[in-house]
Amino acid sequence: MDEYVKFLMVENKSSTLDLHAYICDLKKEIHKLFPHYRFIDNSLIEDTGFAGIKKCNENIIFDEGRQWYKLDIIDKDDTLWKVEFQFGTFENSLNLEVTISAGNYKLDEKNISLERLKIGIKDILYKDWKKVIWLMDKDSEILSTKLYPEIYITENLTRQFINELMIKKYGVDWWDKFVPQKITKKQRNRLTGYKSIVSKFKNVDEKLMSIDTRDLLDLISLKGSKWVPTYNTEINEFLNGTLELNNSRIKQILSEQNTNDYDLWSDLFSHYLPEDFEEKFKIFTDNRNHVMHNKLIDRDAFRIIWDSINEVNTDIKNALSKMNSEVISDEERIANIARVQQFNEEQVYNEQIIAEEEAGVSVRTDEDILSMFEEKITSYLDDFDDLLRFRDYLSMKVHSFELSQEPCNLITITRNYDQKDMQLLGVLESLSSNPGSSSIVTMYFKDYEEQFKVEYINGAYEFNEEQSNYMPITMDQFILNEEELTGSLLELIDAELENPFEQIKADVYSSKRDGGNDILLENEVCEYCGESDSIYIGKTLTDDGKCLKCGKINDLTECPKCSRQFVGGTIYADGSESFCENCEDEIEDT
């Protein structure tokens, strides 16, 4: 049998669990959801080849071995499914690994049987567990692999159309005339790696092939302005030395003298593409990133993404057809050839490009280095944000920032229940574009002495007279131990923004041991974030009714029958209040 799907249910919500009874109940739920499916007799097997289990008040702890169950299911298409349930513990938390296998099942985007089964089992289980982690899914994988080539073809068809149209309209040097620095920087940063891997194409201009898909839309909708100088009193006095102006004011005055120069969408692309193409391409790009980043998809998502690809593909093909039907004059064709020759000659004699390519290093400008620092730190903070999601009592905000010699706020981390926060600041300690020189950014938490440094070493090269080529002296590189940095940041955060559940751990234990008042509402769900067993009623740490995870205050009602507090409740017209769920069930049973 082949394994097709595997996922992990994490941390069972029940403090005690009879595993065999749980699987039996699960079997009934599956049968209820799929009444036409058949279960093979005696297919429910408990592994008895290992030591038994020992129960305590907190949860189930295995002395050794495992607890393993299996269901053999035949669906309406006579496919035999083997569903295995493997219980285990990690840090005293009960987990459940589910594996779905079959021996005679063909993976296909039109075959929905496995999708129904895996989603059905997952949905049944999810109500009893705090989290589900998807480990492997060949069913989702077959959908993605069908989309990959279609995305690739459509994406490169768009690049072809943009390049051909811009060359025909503005010549082969259109890239240098129109493309903004934020895109050209990205292209240059990727150039060395690309050239070193694909040596046979090292003399090919592939700028448009090495930028992101979303950048293509920026090119299509690009707008530019032209400076039309006019007399200005402040500028005149500044030039004559009778008035001081800072760079910001000078830039403002000159910017006000700008006029619109071009709008590539209105001037060019709108004649070949439909009016709603920009919106279609945004959707295509989002879908493309979802698939290329290996995120899970189901058949509903597959159909939506497939239709989106086809829409963009059709629009681009129609645009190419219309463009190719237009006749280019001989004069323009000759001019284009001349521009190609000029462009190639300029590349040959561009010493820095040749030197950097031969030496295999990059010597970057101050602006490039600063941009790389910001990209590096932003990427790291995005990954760090993912790590903090496991500390669900914290919130993290990533700020937009521009590095300078003045400290700027990078992130703010807040403990939700009391809004206590920590601010991570960044400051540009040094910046140098000299070959082989070092540039440093320092990060630190506000009001804390400990500092974390990110260093960039600029590349350097020299001409080797004996070999008649350029050789590297210093390789350009970032110096940052991300694992060490992450550990240090988390250590400070955990010390300053302590887990509230750890803060009240002793009180919760004493309350359960001595039969005192509850500290947390058991089996009650926060009406804001949906988390259970997180609503505080201990009166000392924070306000009663506040969720220790999201920080929101829930309205609590005291049951008039058992005096137990619960979330929600109703006050009736006669002034009486509703009972808790347990008491209502008891009243209904009497």
Image (cartoon, rainbow, N blue to C red):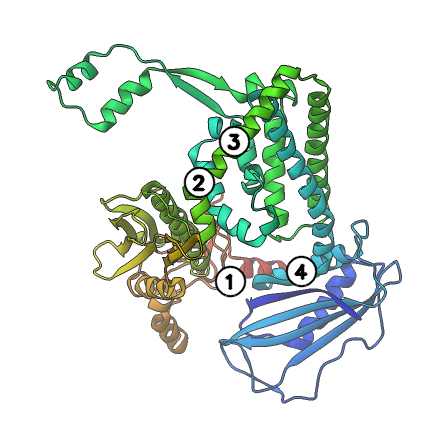
Nearer to us in this view, 190 or 34: 190
User: How would you rate the neighbour count of disc 1 (Cα within 10 Å): few for under 14, some for 14-19, many for 20 or more?
Assistant: some
* Residues under numbered marks 1 and 3 in contact, where contact means CB atoms less than 8 Å apart: no
* Residues under numbered marks 1 and 2 in contact, where contact means CB atoms less than 8 Å apart: no
The image's mark for residue 523 is 1
* Residues under numbered marks 4 and 3 in contact, where contact means CB atoms less than 8 Å apart: no
Residue located 66% across and 63% down the image: 136
Q: x, y percentage for residue 400?
A: 36, 41
Of badges 3 and 2, the one in the foreground is: 3
Q: x, y percentage for residue 445?
A: 26, 56
Quadrant (top left/top right/bottom left/bottom right) for the C terminus = bottom right
Residue located 56% across and 87% down the image: 63
- First in sequence: mark 4 vs mark 1: 4
Say what secondary structure mark 1 lies in. Answer: loop
Say what secondary structure mark 3 lies in. Answer: helix
Q: Is residue 220 visible?
A: no
Q: Which residue lies under the disc numbered 3?
A: 343
Q: Which residue lies under the disc numbered 2?
A: 185
Quadrant (top left/top right/bottom left/bottom right) for the N terminus = bottom right
Q: x, y percentage for residue 559?
A: 46, 57
User: How would you rate the neighbour count of disc 3 (Cα within 10 Å): few for under 14, some for 14-19, many for 20 or more?
Assistant: few
Nearer to us in this view, 191 or 90: 191
- First in sequence: mark 1 vs mark 3: 3
| Kind of residue sitting beneath label 4 | Lys
Of badges 4 and 1, the one in the foreground is: 4
Q: Residue furthest front?
A: 466
Of badges 4 and 2, the one in the foreground is: 2
Of badges 4 and 3, the one in the foreground is: 3
Give the CA separation, mark 1 to mark 2: 54 Å
